[in-house]
Amino acid sequence: MYFAPTILLDTGLGTQAALTATIANGVVAVLAVSTGMWLLGRFGRRPMLLTGQVGVTVSLVLIAFCFLALPESTVRSYLVLASMLTFLLFMQGCIATVFWLMLSEIFPLRLRGFAMGTAVFGTWMANFVVTLVFPPLIDAIGGATFLIFAAVNAATIAYYVRTVPETRGRSMEAIESHFRRQYAT
């Protein structure tokens, strides 16, 4: 989201069109979060998280494909924009809504404040690192940057499959018991 105008400019879209198209990011983000909150009441957290992670990963691969395989054109610009919006839809509608809810569900009460603070700090530090490394990566390797981020997200899918339990409809005690059994030493 931070670099949407820059990315769209790199596709060959004009400055005004790139800035105008960025408005779609905000609209999609608001609609996706609203939809994601509604979906949380109807579907499990784990399926939503995994669906979101797969959608984000595929979107990143599509953005990389557009940069690496398609010639500069208006069509390429709009395909990148569509892939960016798809990324945002899955990120905000599935991953972000589930992430913030699950933070309050997975930590034991006696550690919840500290653990949530640590998790949120880690999230913002990861955000900082991505924001810091993205411009130099784009300058150095162009569209292949998105393949690196896709690989990280693919690894995240594997991690989620192995470690994230379904928390919908489960008590805090049942979730804590699950983690105690899974990570007993």
Image (cartoon, rainbow, N blue to C red):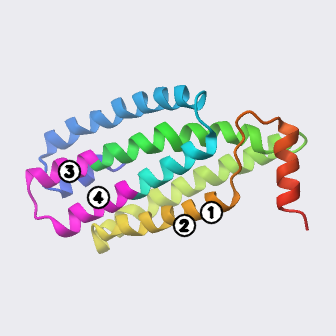
Q: Which residues are magenta?
A: 58-82
Q: Which mark is residue 159?
A: 1
* 34 w.r.t. 19: above or below: above
Q: Using the image as rendered, state which of residue 70 and residue 167 is in the foreground.
A: 167
The amino acid type found where label 3 is placed reads Leu
Q: Are marks 1 and 2 in contact (CB under 8 Å)?
A: yes
The amino acid type found where label 1 is placed reads Tyr
Q: Earlier in the sequence, mark 4 or mark 2?
A: 4
Dominant SS type (magenta) = helix
The percent position of residue 13, horizontal first and vertical second, equals 13, 49
Query: Which residue is label 2 attached to?
Result: 155
Q: Earlier in the sequence, mark 4 or mark 3?
A: 4
Q: Which mark is residue 63?
A: 4
At 42% from the left edge and 51% from the top edge, which residue is drawn?
55
The residue furthest bottom is 140
Residue 152 visible in rendering? yes
Q: Is residue 30 magenta?
A: no
The percent position of residue 85, horizontal first and vertical second, equals 32, 43
Q: Quick one: SS at disc 1?
A: helix
The Cα atoms of the two marked residues, 1 and 4, are separated by: 23 Å
Q: Earlier in the sequence, mark 1 or mark 3?
A: 3
Count all numbered tags in the image, as a single digit: 4
Query: Which residue is label 3 attached to?
Result: 79
The Cα atoms of the two marked residues, 1 and 2, are separated by: 6 Å
Q: Quick one: SS at disc 4?
A: helix
Q: Quick one: SS at disc 2?
A: helix
